[in-house]
Image (spheres, rainbow, N blue to C red):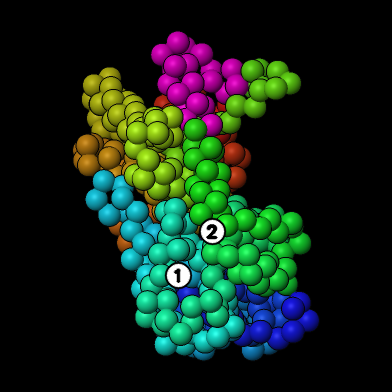
């Protein structure tokens, strides 16, 4: 299949859908990328990247220029369809698969015998089977005649190109034939090993991977809370504990964000509330860490006013959920900034995010100007440029992400 031309339709051109569509187009596929946002479609067709991802802009321009990638607001007939749309929450952290269903319904008139349908969106267990039932209910003549599978992404923002190609993939079909057909497609561009399984196991695998990381981060964040009370440098503590040959504690932060680690565990706890107790506790700890950070900033501002008789200038350094990206989804840093601005409207708050040109809520300030002007500096995201800033004894520095670990 690697040497055969194939027409592919990607439904969703976000942080995962667009890079995957670009890599598929680079491998020789004829790709139509679909997004309901006309601005994203227009930018993509113009070869302009609407997300921040190193090296991806050059690849986009290449595949658009070659004609291998075109974007549209509605799907077109293809031989393979990939659902890469958001799966947000409804009330009480209940997973909402309405976007997956809407994307699936949009291609129902286009499906034909021999087609491949794959969900990449993070989904509750059983979603692939539900979409298969939907397809077969609306198009009963296709039962047993198309291939349906689930294949979650597992990439790191900032290193997406390499990881889309080199990471192993878990691929679960609703039957063995579907698994093999999906593996054949991904084999066009994935150099990592393709691990076949069933759809439910593949769905649970994605949720398990990120829940595991959430639990590990919760341990580090809980340590940071303990160390703050005990007067211990948590960064030094973790570095020393990690000298043990079988210990590998992660670094604490101001919480957990992004559309994976901060979200996926709820897909398990919502379905299995009695069994997923550790997973639920980890979520609570990581959510609390953001609240704790916000309260610490507010209290520091109030103390400054009492001690100095004036309102401070406060630099909130970082909005993204992790270093050196522009992704603000589920960001604890953004939550903390909002809480501080709501609680301390008498302080001058300078909001910094070097990876975003502008924001529809916050007026952004250059990080060097903010650092120079600030009385209180709050490091929320460990962006690389922040690490070049000098320590200043005349500033109150709240370092929640380890910029000045010593």
> Which residue shows up at 78% across the image and 81% down it?
3
Q: Is residue 271 visible?
A: yes
Establish if 271 lies above or below 122: above
As for residue 233 lying within the magenta part, the answer is yes
Task: Provide the residue designation for mark 2.
Answer: 199
Establish if 230 lies above or below 262: above
Rendered location of residue 355, percent (x, y): 51, 56
Please name whichever residue, 304 or 383, is drawn nearer the observer in this view of the structure.
Answer: 383
Please name whichever residue, 348 or 361, is drawn nearer the observer in this view of the structure.
Answer: 361
Q: Which residues are magenta?
A: 216-238
The quadrant holding residue 66 is bottom right
Judged from the image, the secondary structure of the residue bearing numbered disc 1 is: helix
Badge 2 density bin: few <14, some 14–19, many ≥20, Cα 10 Å = many
As for residue 198 lying within the magenta part, the answer is no
Judged from the image, the secondary structure of the residue bearing numbered disc 2 is: helix
Q: Split into 4 quadrants, where in the image is the N terminus?
A: bottom right
Please name whichever residue, 124 or 135, is drawn nearer the observer in this view of the structure.
Answer: 135
Rendered location of residue 13, percent (x, y): 49, 72
Rendered location of residue 342, percent (x, y): 22, 42
Task: Provide the residue designation for mark 1.
Answer: 132
The circle drawn on residue 292 is: none
């Amino acid at each position: 299949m690697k040497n055969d031309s194939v027409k592919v339709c990607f439904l969703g051109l976000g942080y995962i859908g667009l890079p995957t569509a670009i890599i598929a187009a680079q491998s020789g596929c004829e790709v139509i990328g679909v997004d309901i946002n006309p601005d994203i479609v227009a930018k993509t067709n113009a070869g302009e990247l609407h997300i921040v991802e190193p090296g991806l802009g050059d690849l986009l321009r290449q595949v658009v220029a070659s004609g291998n990638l075109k974007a549209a607001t509605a799907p077109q007939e293809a031989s393979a369809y990939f659902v890469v749309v958001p799966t947000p929450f409804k009330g009480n952290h209940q997973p909402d698969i309405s976007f997956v269903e809407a994307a699936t319904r949009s291609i129902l008139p286009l499906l034909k015998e021999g087609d491949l349908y794959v969900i990449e969106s993070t989904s509750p267990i059983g979603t692939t089977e539900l979409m298969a039932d939907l397809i077969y209910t609306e198009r009963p003549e296709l039962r047993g005649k198309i291939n349906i599978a689930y294949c979650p992404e597992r990439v790191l923002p900032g290193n997406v190109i390499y990881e889309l190609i080199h990471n192993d993939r878990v691929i679960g079909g609703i039957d063995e034939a579907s698994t093999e057909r999906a593996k054949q497609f991904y084999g066009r561009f994935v150099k990592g090993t393709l691990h076949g399984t069933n759809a439910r196991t593949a769905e649970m695998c994605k949720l398990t991977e990120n829940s595991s990381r959430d639990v590990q981060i919760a341990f580090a964040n809980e340590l940071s809370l303990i160390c703050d009370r005990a007067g211990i440098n948590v960064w030094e503590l973790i570095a020393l504990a990690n000298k043990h040959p079988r210990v590998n504690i992660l670094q604490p932060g101001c919480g957990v964000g992004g559309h994976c680690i901060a979200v996926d565990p709820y897909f398990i706890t919502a379905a299995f509330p009695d069994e997923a107790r550790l997973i639920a506790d980890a979520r609570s700890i990581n959510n609390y860490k953001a609240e704790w950070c916000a309260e610490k900033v507010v209290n520091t501002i109030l103390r400054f006013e009492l001690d100095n008789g004036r309102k401070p200038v406060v630099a909130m350094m970082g909005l993204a959920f992790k270093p050196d990206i522009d992704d603000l989804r589920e960001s604890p840093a953004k939550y903390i900034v909002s809480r501080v601005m709501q609680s301390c409207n008498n302080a001058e708050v300078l909001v910094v995010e070097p990876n975003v040109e502008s924001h529809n809520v916050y007026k952004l300030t250059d990080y060097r100007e903010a650092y120079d002007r600030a009385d209180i500096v709050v490091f929320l995201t460990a962006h690389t440029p922040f690490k070049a800033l000098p320590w200043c004894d005349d500033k109150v520095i709240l370092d929640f992400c380890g910029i000045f670990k010593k």
